Image (cartoon, grey):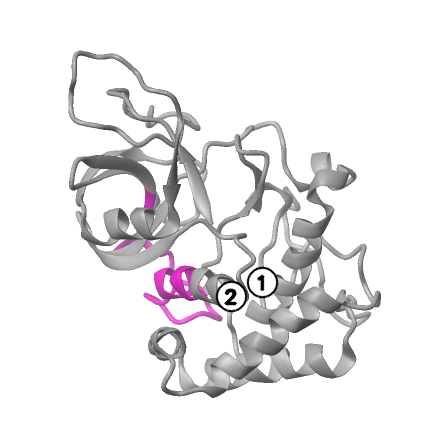
Amino acid sequence: MSLSASSGQDSPDSGSNSPSSATSPPDGGEHNAPALLAEDEVLTVLANGVVEEQGLLPYSSNHSFLILVAHDGLTLPAVYKPQRGESPLWDFEWGTLCKRETAAYLIDTALNWALVPPTVLRDGTRGLGSIQFYVDNDTDAHYFTTQADARFVEAYRKLALFDYIINNADRKSGHCLNGSDNRVWAIDHGVCFHVEYKLRTVIWEFSQQPIEPDMLQDIVYLSRLLDDSRDPLTRQIRTLLSEGEWDALTVRVGQLLHSRLYPAPSPYRRNYPWPPI
């Protein structure tokens, strides 16, 4: 996976959805053409860079900060969600939401679906938290406005399966970003991986349809990887989840492989998040 970024001196505006930019050291103020960064490059910057806060992002139930992360001559915008800024929830252990954000990215990495922006768990300006690459996006576009666009159908099909796998309790339409690179990006995965079934999503139109063979093979690969206790990615995911959450994750993967069908809403549960956008 490669990510689009532009180099220059401008910093993201902390009060709005601002560009995903890679900022080089000052060189006279001239801007270069947008560049493509390899995922490994982005992860290296996010994991090792110096963090500079730009401001608190509005409308978040938990504290989220727009930051710049600088490392080895490259500066990237990102979203920092510190553990200490998490609001208490009755059904999720306090202090685990940033770990779940990171685990969701790692599951996406294992599937090779490129839905979740690169995310790391590390210490920042306010302690331990998740740091996720900031995706420049069309703020007027979300799932409800793009679901009929043929360009995004495969991504939304993958996302429907992905949300079942991670047991996403809050897939709002606004959590599906239409990036400036014309890709779907999925964000906000703090309330996932619960032991109990909690899937609440706006993406149900594929229910009971057969899972496509190539996506099924990706899930087979994920299942084999999760069974390999020596795999570094598997070991990393296990450190982020409780034993019960890990067991429930493997059960859900097995259920998809057994049914080979997209999940369907339950007639006995609340299947949609609120608000839906």
- Label 2: state its secondary structure: loop
Query: Considering the image in quadrants, where does the C terminus appear?
Result: top right
Mark number, residue 169: 1
Total tally of numbered discs in the picture: 2
Residue 222 against residue 86 in the figure, above or below: below
Residue 54 left/right relative to 60: left
Residue 233 against residue 129 in the figure, above or below: below
What amino acid type is highlighted by mark number 1? Ala
Q: Residue at x 63, y 56 (%)?
A: 159
- Label 1: state its secondary structure: loop
Pointer 1 and pointer 2: residues touching (CB < 8 Å)? yes
| Mark 1 and mark 2: Cα distance apart in space | 6 Å
Residue 63 against residue 56 in the figure, above or below: below
Where is mark 2, residue-wise?
A: 192
Q: Residue at x 71, y 36 (%)?
A: 146
Q: Give the range drawn in magenta.
A: 79-103
> Is 91 included in the stretch rendered in magenta?
yes
- Residue 175 picture location, percent across and down: 56, 46
What amino acid type is highlighted by mark number 2? Cys
Nearer to the camera, 255 or 100: 255
Nearer to the camera, 175 or 209: 209
- Residue 231 picture location, percent across and down: 38, 80
Q: Which residue is drawn at 42% across and 66% down?
A: 103
Which quadrant of the structure image shows residue 143? top right
